[in-house]
């Protein structure tokens, strides 16, 4: 079924675009919400009447997208991931991660606009594409760094855990305590004589 978009809808297109969608999607979602109207001769004539304003709006949107794209091309988005001794990463960087990082940097991009071939799981430089407009797609550089690894604890390396150390300390403290009590008892018995 063909519909004409009445407003910008990122997954399909922009105002004035005629797109093919499944009948149920159009009837149950797009048309009731006012996002699109059914493509017909009458609706086409009404669209042609409004086409001048729509074309001007599309040109403006494209220019804004190109300007924003020039800014996005210049930044490098950095991530840090944990990497094991064998070089295997723990976790991955997805479009959702890129979206949240761009938002913290002050750039508003929806994760559905970000295209990754696969989730990023290795250290180094990577690229993702951001679709800002139906005619404007820009690459974004992603730099992935390895998180510093923590040094192993000496006691754990020798096989002695904290429990063994506590038990040993408590045993030594008990022996010292018993020696002190026997010494004080002998002093008391000498004083009484």
Image (cartoon, grey):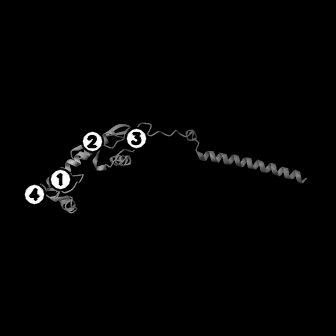
Image position of 34 (left or right of 166): left
| Residue that badge 1 annotates | 54
Q: Which mark is residue 138?
A: 2
* SS label for mark 4: helix
Name, please, the residue furthest toward the bottom.
Answer: 32
Which label sits on residue 89? 3
**Callouts 4 and 3 close, C-beta under 8 Å:** no
Secondary element type, mark 3: strand
Asked if labels 1 and 3 touch by Cβ distance under 8 angstroms, the answer is: no
Q: Position of residue 58 (x, y in %)?
A: 20, 49
For the residue labelled by badge 1, is the local secondary structure a helix, a strand or a loop? helix
Mark 1 is surrounded, within 10 Å at the Cα level, by few (under 14), some (14 to 19) or many (20 or more) other residues, namely some
Mark seen at residue 45: 4
Sequence-first disc among 2 and 4: 4
- Image vertical order of residue 164 relative to residue 3, above or below: above
Of tags 3 and 1, which is closer to the observer?
1
Cα separation, mark 1 vs mark 2, equals: 24 Å
* Labels 3 and 1: the sequence-earlier one: 1
For marks 4 and 3 on the same chain, the one whose residue lies earlier in the sequence: 4
- Between discs 2 and 3, the one toward the N terminus: 3
* Front residue of this view, candidates 27 and 17: 17
Q: CA distance from mark 2 to mark 3?
A: 27 Å
């Amino acid at each position: 079924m063909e519909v004409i978009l009445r407003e910008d809808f990122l997954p399909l297109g922009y105002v004035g675009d005629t797109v093919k969608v499944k009948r149920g999607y159009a009837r149950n979602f797009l048309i009731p919400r006012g996002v699109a109207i059914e493509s017909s001769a009458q609706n086409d004539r009404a669209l042609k009447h409004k086409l001048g304003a729509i074309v001007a709006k599309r040109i403006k949107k494209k220019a804004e997208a190109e300007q924003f794209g020039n800014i996005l091309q210049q930044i490098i988005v950095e991530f840090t991931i944990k990497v094991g001794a064998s070089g295997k990463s723990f976790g991955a960087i997805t479009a959702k991660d890129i979206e949240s990082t761009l938002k913290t940097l002050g750039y508003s991009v929806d994760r559905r606009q970000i295209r990754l071939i696969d989730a990023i799981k290795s250290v180094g430089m990577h690229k993702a594409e951001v679709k800002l407009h139906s005619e404007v797609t820009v690459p974004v550089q992603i730099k992935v760094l390895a998180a510093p690894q923590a040094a192993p604890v000496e006691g754990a390396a020798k096989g002695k855990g904290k429990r063994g150390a506590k038990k040993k300390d408590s045993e030594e403290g008990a022996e010292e305590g018993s020696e002190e009590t026997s010494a004080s008892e002998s002093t008391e018995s000498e004083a009484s004589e």
